[in-house]
Image (spheres, rainbow, N blue to C red):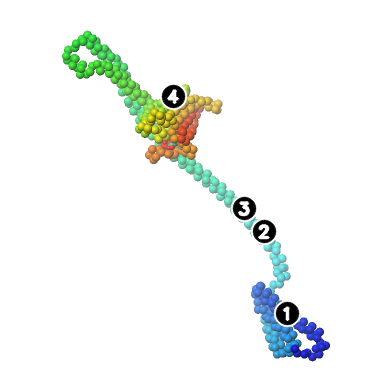
Amino acid sequence: MMKLAGEGDHWPLVWLNTGSLFLIALCCYSIFLLLLYFVRRRQYASLSGILPLFGLFILCCGTTNLLYIWAIWYPVYWILVLMKGITALVSLYTVVVLGSLKQKALAMTSTIQLETASFALKPEITESKQTKIRFYEDLEQRVAQLKQKLAEVNKRLQAEMQECQGAKSKLQQIQFQLVQTEKMSSLGMMVASIAHEINNPVNFVYGNIAPAKEYIQDLLGLVELYQQHYPQPVPAIQEYADAIDLDFLVKDLPKVLESMKVGSERIRDIIMSLRTFSRMDKTQMTGVNIHEGIESTLLILQHRLKGKPERSEIEVVKNYGILPPVECYPGQLNQVFMNILVNAIDAMEWKGISLEQLGSDKQTPNSFPRIEICTEVVKTQEATSNPQSVVIRIRDNGPGVRERARRLLFDPFFTTKPVGQGTGLGLSISYQIVTTTHGGQLDCVSIPGAGTEFIIQIPVRQSHRRYTEIS
Ligand SMILES: Nc1ncnc2c1ncn2[C@@H]1O[C@H](COP(=O)(O)OP(=O)(O)O)[C@@H](O)[C@H]1O
Ligand SMILES: [Mg+2]
């Protein structure tokens, strides 16, 4: 280590100098590092060049101080001088750059200035914020109003659409009713005119059977008298009597006449039923015997009730009560009975069991298709001028109707029958006839698998109502 002049006396000064220099150098390096850190963290656009330059200047100062310390022990001054020269150059350059930045630095807004400006702008900012809030509130209100209006329009449109749909289905219903009614009325007219045409000749036949029977009895009596008085007739008469088998003829002729009478009576009944069914003669409401209508409908459906190879005969059980004459359009009510009975027969087509399958031990009452018709008079609840109604129940033991289908039964075009067999109009027309035309009720009760019951209720008197005739 080198020896300093007068070192024994100046050691405290030397150490103080060294410490100060070291501290300055340390601070210079720290400042340099801090400046670098600021420059990196903040982009001082306008002062970007000067800060690193300051940093460099301070770095040079710090290094110079370190070299001073170095020179105390190792007096190699040229390094110190070189460093000082570099520091001088850097400081000079810094002065030049700072001078050029003077204008820019003065133009920079100070924090106080910024605060003052911000304070001055505060009311405006608050005002603008409030305006913005008011604008949004207004907007929200308008959107809500528009939404409400839209919902109302939507609701109105839906109601109108429903109305349109209702009107459309009503129109369709009326259209098909008209077609059906037209068909029924032409059918009724045809049936009525045929019945009328056949009625006269049948009446001749039926009317002449009794006198014919009398004449034949007379003639047979005469033949018997001849046989008593001329037991041995001439050969020609004997031959003729043998040829015609006189004994058999005498026995069989009354039977032939009797069956002719029964046959013509049946024709008369059928004609009566046809006339009752069509009732074209009565377009006004009249008091009619409901049982006659049911009977005539059953007679017309006789062929469908009969047994078939695939099912036994449909038994019809009648439990008729005592009914007063009911004021109604008989032709239309008969159409209702017809629709319901045909449906019951259709429903039971599968229910009947094959006749070949019938063994005496296999027969159970439920194995047979059956229709039960009950009628009765009931008191209507309201004490109106119309206190009585007749109730006709037509029950079958067919497969029944499921709940979902039961709700659709009276809708036009609802059918479960194959295309070409069912129109789905029978029950909807029946419903119209019973409810609208006669002010009654038509209901259906069914237990799937056990059977179906249609309940028709018609007021006995209709005079207080105004009616819309379907036909
Ligand atoms: N007695 C019944 N038993 C079971 N189903 C029935 C009965 N009566 C009516 N239905 C059901 O109601 C439907 C509608 O009957 P309807 O209006 O007369 O039309 P359609 O006879 O032309 O099908 C039938 O297709 C059938 O499914
Ligand atoms: Mg039907």
The amino acid on which the numbered mark 4 sits, given as a three-letter code, is: Asn
Disc nearer the start of the sequence (4/1)? 1
First in sequence: mark 1 or mark 3? 1
| Residue 269 point in image, percent of width and height | 36, 24
- Distance from Cα at disc 3 to Cα at disc 4: 71 Å
Q: Quadrant location of the N terminus?
A: bottom right
Residue 26 numbered tag: 1
Q: Residue at image x 22%, y 11%?
A: 227
Is 150 situated above or below 326?
Answer: below
Q: Residues within 10 Å of mark 1 (few under 14, many from 20)?
A: some
Of badges 1 and 3, the one in the foreground is 1
Answer with the quarter of the image where residue 247 lies: top left
Q: Nearer the viewer, residue 278 or 122?
A: 278
Give the position of the C terminus as an image quadrant: top left
User: Would you place residue 450 above or below residue 123 in this image?
Assistant: above
Q: Position of residue 107 (x, y in %)?
A: 68, 75
Q: Does dot 1 land on a helix, a strand or a loop?
A: helix
Residue in front for this viewpoint, 125 or 261: 261
Q: Earlier in the sequence, mark 1 or mark 2?
A: 1
Q: Are marks 4 and 1 in contact (CB under 8 Å)?
A: no
Question: Secondary structure beneath disc 4?
Answer: loop
- In this rendering, is residue 185 above or below 14? above
- Residue at the (81%, 90%) spot, across then down: 6
User: Three-letter amino acid code at disc 2?
Assistant: Gln
Q: Amino acid at mark 3?
A: Gln
Q: Position of residue 110 (x, y in %)?
A: 71, 72
